[in-house]
Image: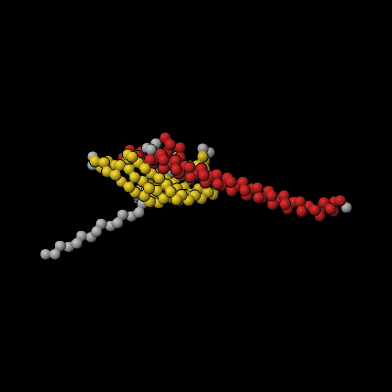
């Protein structure tokens, strides 16, 4: 008789325990997901800050330092950290002084050990042009892909896109 009562009440005990277990698991995943989003956001902001400060040591901490890194910018591609660092990042940092580089409207999506983000960026700096300093301002949109590795989240792909420049006005013919 007691066995029959236990079998009869088992669903009333088992189902709530199952629901609580699933709820805690879902809550933990949501917490971990939010934590990953915060870390990804921090990596992106540290990347922008490292560029603004000409800090290659800090950039090394947030970018993938191997051949998996790809950069597509202004119709040019860099493949691997050494190519990007030596032929793009360091020369560009060296050309710019008083640099401000900021990200806004960052939207992050995390799926396991991969994250992608879209953002807006602004940049202003003083650059040398034919021996004279000139100020430049710009901005655009960017997409970043990050991978969670044993040493943390790293940027593995970056693609900024600046607005197209307006075409030069057409020359007006002179009337004879």
Kindly indicate the quadrant of the structure image that contains residue 67: top left
Residue 168 at x, y percent in the picture: 25, 57
Residue 87 visible at all: no
Q: How many marks?
A: 0
Drawn side of residue 135 relative to residue 106, left or right: left
Position of 152 relative to 142 (above/below): above
Going by the picture, which residue comes out furthest to the bottom? 175
Quadrant showing the C terminus = bottom left
Going by the picture, which residue comes out furthest to the left? 176
Residue 172 at x, y percent in the picture: 19, 62
Colouring of the image: secondary structure
Residue 1 at x, y percent in the picture: 88, 52
Kindly indicate the quadrant of the structure image that contains residue 64: top left
Going by the picture, which residue comes out furthest to the top? 57
Kindly identify the residue that appears in the image at 40 percent across and 48 percent down. 121
Pick the residue in front: 9 or 64: 9
Pick the residue in front: 73 or 37: 37
Kindly identify the residue that appears in the image at 36 percent across and 49 percent down. 139
Drawn side of residue 85 relative to residue 172, left or right: right
Residue 133 visible at all: yes
Pick the residue in front: 6 or 63: 6
Residue 12 at x, y percent in the picture: 76, 53
Kindly identify the residue that appears in the image at 38 percent across and 48 percent down. 122
Kindly identify the residue that appears in the image at 65 percent across and 47 percent down. 24
């Amino acid at each position: 008789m007691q066995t029959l009562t236990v079998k009869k009440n088992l669903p009333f005990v088992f189902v709530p325990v199952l629901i609580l277990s699933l709820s805690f698991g879902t809550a933990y995943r949501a917490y971990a997901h939010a934590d990953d989003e915060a870390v990804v956001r921090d990596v992106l902001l540290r990347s922008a800050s490292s560029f603004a400060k000409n800090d290659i040591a800090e950039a090394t901490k947030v970018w993938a330092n191997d051949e998996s890194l790809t950069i597509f910018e202004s119709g040019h591609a860099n493949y691997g950290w050494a190519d990007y660092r030596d032929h793009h990042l360091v020369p560009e940092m060296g050309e710019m002084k008083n640099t401000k580089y900021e990200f806004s409207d960052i939207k992050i999506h995390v799926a396991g050990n991969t994250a992608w983000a879209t953002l807006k960026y602004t940049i202003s700096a003083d650059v040398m042009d034919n021996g004279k300093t000139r100020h430049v301002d710009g901005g655009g949109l960017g997409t970043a892909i990050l991978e969670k590795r044993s040493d943390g989240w790293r940027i593995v792909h970056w693609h900024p896109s600046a607005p197209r420049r307006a075409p030069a006005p057409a020359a007006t013919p002179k009337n004879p």
